[in-house]
Image (spheres, rainbow, N blue to C red):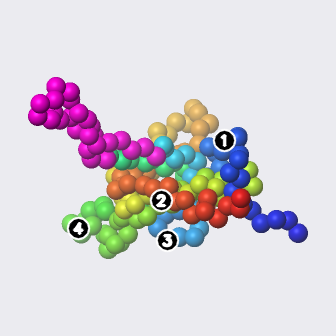
Amino acid sequence: MSKPFSVNVSRFDPYKTYRFLVYFGNSSTPVAGVSKVSALKRSADVVEYKEGGNALIRKGLGRTKYEPITFERGVTYADEFEAWANASQVLDKGAPSSSLLQLRKEVRIELLNEQSQPVHRFLVHRAWVSEYQALPDLDAGTNAIAIEHIKVEHEGWEHDLSLSEQAEF
């Protein structure tokens, strides 16, 4: 029998960017066919101030900002993107749909190794769809795949270190 998987902490080769899974909400099933996820990015405002009697300008940490994340996939039968995007849409009723409770979701992004085992997990908190593209420009003169995408705003992300805590040393 083979030894159970453990994270290789002495790994030198970087992980591949094309091996990942995305989960919306508490689902244990990954979102079908996600082909691209934009970078997870955060930045902090710089607060400059002077202290009395000191000619130097000091710099301090201000508010942290998180960039939106874009998810792309080929148009298929699966409706996770559209259903989530429709949660906040005001239709003929004059109010958001009854699925308003699903407006904000936790998103889980897992980076996989060559054996398709998760090695890094990122948790995106209180995410909601700010932009939805159902179809790209349609052009009969090309052979491109129809891509849909959602742009997700959120209140921050964190690296879930529980995978590395399970590593055997």
Q: Which mark is residue 26?
A: 3
Pick out the residue farthest to the top: 55
Q: Quadrant of the C terminus?
A: bottom right
Identify which amino acid the numbered label 2 is placed on: Leu
Disc 2 versus disc 3: nearer the observer: 2
Q: What segment carries the magenta color? A: 40-64
Disc 3 versus disc 4: nearer the observer: 3
Q: Which mark sits nearer the N-terminus, 2 or 3?
A: 3
Tell me the residue that label 1 is attached to: 14
Pinpoint residue 36: horizontal percent, then vertical percent.
55, 46
Q: Is residue 54 magenta?
A: yes
Identify which amino acid the numbered label 1 is placed on: Pro
Residue 74 in view: no
Pinpoint residue 128: horizontal percent, then vertical percent.
36, 58
Secondary structure beneath label 4 = loop
Q: Residues within 10 Å of mark 4 (few under 14, many from 20)?
A: few
- Name the foreground residue: 135 vs 113: 113
